Image: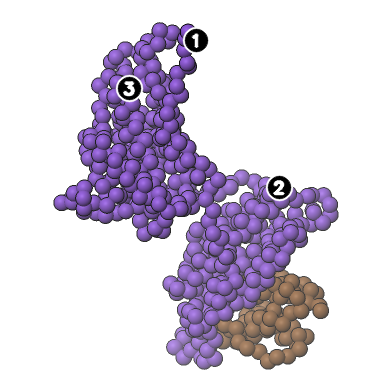
Amino acid sequence: MLLSHAITLAEARSHLAALARRAYNDEASAEYERVLLHLDVIHGDYIPGISDVYDEAADILYGIAEHAIEDLVAHGIDALQVELLLDMLDAARAKDVP
Amino acid sequence: MYAENGGQLRAELSTLLRQHRVQQRLGGAGSHTIPETTTTDERRLLGEQIGRYRHSALVWCVQAVRAANPRMNLHGTSTRTRGPAEELRHRLDVAISSSSGLPGLDELSTEQPFAMVESWRQVARAATLGEHDFDAGLGYGRLSQVQCMTLLKDASDVARGLVGLDRRYSNIPGWKPLKEAGWLARAAETCATFAGYDEPDYTIDLRGWQPRRTLVEGPGLPGLVGVLQAQHNLLVHLDEFPDARSLRLILDSQRIVSRDAATLDPRASSDWTDRSSTYLRLIHATNDIGGMVGNGGPAAGEAALAASRIEQVTRAVQAGTDVVDSGPLRHLAQLGREIDERITQVIQQGARERIYFARVPFPRVDKDAAGLVKPTRQRYVPMTADVCQELLELVRDELRPEAEAPRAPKRAAASREELTLALVHRPEPRRAQSGPSM
């Protein structure tokens, strides 16, 4: 894994974890965790850890996570897998309502 | 299990103790209305066979006494210096040393034509199977003091029964009586009195050897039974240690099962909701846990099946096309408790033996890596209390189900009482002859 890939992946993971932590309800939180789990399954076990992120609004966290996942295509991740991840992320967002 | 083997042993012994006129039961003479069907030689052979069956019961007794009171060296002791348990064990050893030997496998497994011999076969069979119990949770060190006393009392009562039958069988041709039967009877009675002072603890019946769980193979069963099938198979597969990724999949599935079970089971809804919430917190706490040791693939597969099946059942119930009985829901709750217990063990073992690791980000470049582009240095540290305090606390305080106090089986007290009554019973008096009245 190259450095740029690792940074992108760490960004996606960290923001997904932040979204899961601050979700409005348990269902949405579990859905974000499922996206994170799928992301880990795609990459195997050698992946960077989750870092603390700035306490931004959910929209900003979502945008960063989405952008980071989209960027994974440039690092050799299968485009179909990335689309599936984005779809799961979208489904989680749909449930994340107060 | 001790309940089955010990119960069978006592039940058959009670039956034998209530049987009198032993010769007739072996086909011998005794009444002008019942013809003699066996010769003296045949009855002698039957007596020898009963002696072998009795040997099995004696061996069971001595093993039970050893499990309850394992004083190893009795050499140089005397009746005065030995305690009740040691004295019984010594007398049992003496009786066994001059007994006829164990029965063969054919004798144990072949049904006998005479009901009395068949009862003896069942006694020997229960005693032989019961020997496995002492190495599977019924040994000294695993039993409380009260349980030791209960086991000792059981062994003493069985020994008393054997001595009583020995006296009754003395007329069987060629019968070989127990050596020093009087001493054995006295030791057994003393030991039974000594062990019976306190209230017994019949939860001992729950101990002993149990068959291993096996997979419920075949196609998926319909409805909630299918969920039970998948949960059961998950529990079986969890015997194998799961890797970290599979563990996260299993945690997610259990959250879904709990969430939907809360809908299906209104009476235990709050319990299921709590379980679902606990699993969600576990999912959060494990999202940065790694570890490739173990094989959790089959368990994760069954977990996914359980989650998808319960979602189908919930949809069907909400649509009104299916109804759920209370029996399977109760079984589901029991399986859930067992899975919680196993997952607790897995996570604690993973932390203790450093199988699972917590990823800790180190924002440094690994200068030793090959190639022009250097990756970030990634370090894993064992999932110890310093790193994953939250996860280990969650597991310890919330996931581990409260241990219920074990309850003795319903038949436990009745089985013992039956044998005690059989030991002290007297045969019914013969019908009073109608004589001349004044």
Report which quarter residue A60 is drawn in. Answer: bottom right
Looking at the rendered structure, which numbered label has been put on residue B437?
1
Is B17 placed above or below A39 here?
A: above
The colour scheme used to paint the residues is by chain
Residue B433 picture location, percent across and down: 47, 12
Visible residue check, residue B18: yes
Looking at the rendered structure, which numbered label has been put on residue B31?
none
Taking depth in this image into account, of B370 and A54 the one nearest to the observer is A54
Q: Which chain is brown?
A: A
Task: State left or right for residue B194 relative to residue B329.
Answer: left
Task: State left or right for residue B176 relative to residue B76.
Answer: right
Image colour for chain B is: purple
Check whether the beta carbons of the residues at disc 1 and disc 3 lie within 8 A of each other: no
Q: Earlier in the sequence, mark 3 or mark 2?
A: 3
- Residue drawn 21% across the image and 53% down it: B81
Amino acid at circle 1: Ser
Disc 1 crowd, CA 10 A, few/some/many (<14, 14-19, 20+)? few
Residue B317 picture location, percent across and down: 80, 54
